[in-house]
Amino acid sequence: MQVEILTPDKVLFSGEATSVKLPGSKGQFEVLSNHAPLVSSLDVGSVRVKTDTGDQNFNIKGGVVEITKDKVVVLA
Amino acid sequence: MANLKEVRVRITSVSSTQQITKAMKLVSATKLRKAQNAIVQMRPYADKLRSLLLNLADSMEGDSLAAYLNERPVNNVLLIVVTSDRGLCGGFNANVAKQTNILLKGKYAEQAAKGKVTILPIGKKGFEYFGRANAKMFTDYREAFQNLNAERGFAIAEWVLDAFRKKQFDAVEIVYNKFKNAGTQILTAEPFLPIDMKTLATSKVGKTKSDYIFEPGKTEILEELIPRILKTTLYRTLLDSHASEHGARMVAMDKATDNAGELLKTLRLQYNRARQAAITNEISEIVGGAAALG
């Protein structure tokens, strides 16, 4: 699935991933592809993106995530 | 006829000034490109925020949001005045100051007379101008343009939102130069708070299909989203002003370089005329002397 992590300064990450772990405001959760459409607010924490070539971590200070069928957009 | 040496000295001084203005123009061109990039970089972020908001527009109510939405009788006013840190950019800063004064004498004259208008200068020039005018100021963020980034921009917005929530101010307005293109800035004064729902909900971004699950809930997400949009808006005005500044400076310096060129042309003409006159003079003296001897 397609993952984008956006900040006002720049695009932190944009590309294919197998799963994303997110610091939701009601607890951490992980998103795989074909997830139901969801909008959730995020807490301070780290976003972990799993890709075929390895994992990547991004620290965010809260935000919002929008999840559609095969796309995850994190607004940090 | 002007003295040869005098003209020569002026030529050197004008041409070194021209070199400086030319260099400043080039520097501004580079900085302008960088500033424009920053605007482009934040566009996807801002667009996404707005499209999310559109999906939530139908559930815009609740007490927490009322804090930003409701208009109340205007007692205290905050004017955010965005200028540059440096001069030599044409009418850039003077225009902002003028526009602010129009607001102070027109729309907010009543509040200004009671000393209830606070100015939040962003950029040193505005700070200096309103310092001389003895205006009531909050000066913590006057140097925001040194290393401007989202974090700094958001910090300013945070302070403004907080002060508005605490009812220190009942209306907040921003005066700044909106960026159109390198040659054009649009002087703008726009209300920042309270939010005008119409401008917020109408946007070019299309509404996406909205059968989302909202976690923890629509209101909570709105509470997160609205301040974020406001912060992004403020940061965007700062970026706009920053790009405008370099655009204005580039144009001003281009004109200055041209003018210096014109001036050099006339000075050189003057110099050559003076030189020729001196030579003619000398020849006629020699000829005259020779004739007297012969």
Image (cartoon, rainbow, N blue to C red):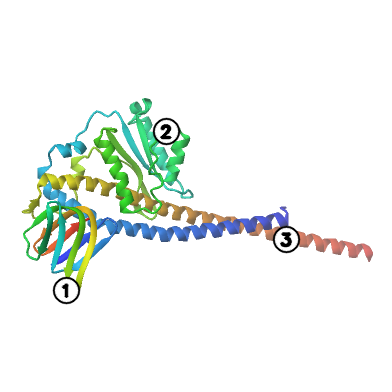
Q: Chain of mark 2?
A: B
The mark closer to the camera, 3 or 2, is 2
- Residue B39 visible somewhere in the drawing: yes
Q: Nearer the viewer, mark 1 or mark 3?
A: 1
The answer to which quarter of the image holds residue B58 is top left
Determine which of the numbered discs, if any, sits on residue B7 in the image: none
Q: Which circle, 1 or 2, is nearer the viewer?
A: 1
**CA separation, marks 1 and 3?**
79 Å
Q: How many marks?
A: 3
Check disc 2: other Cα within 10 Å, few if <14, some if 14-19, many if 20+: some
- Label 1: few (<14), some or many (≥20) within 10 Å? few
A58 or B151: nearer the viewer: A58
Label 1 chain ID: A
Q: Position of residue B80 (x, y in %)?
A: 34, 40
Which is more toward the observer, B37 or A10?
A10
Q: Cβ–Cβ below 8 Å for labels 1 and 2?
A: no
Q: Amino acid type of disc 2?
A: Ala
Query: How far from the left and from the top, in percent, is residue B206?
Result: 15, 54
- x 55%, y 60%: residue: B19
Identify the residue under disc 2: B135
What kind of residue is marked 1? Asp
- Dot 1 falls on a residue whose secondary structure is loop
Q: Residue at x 17, y 59 (%)?
A: A73
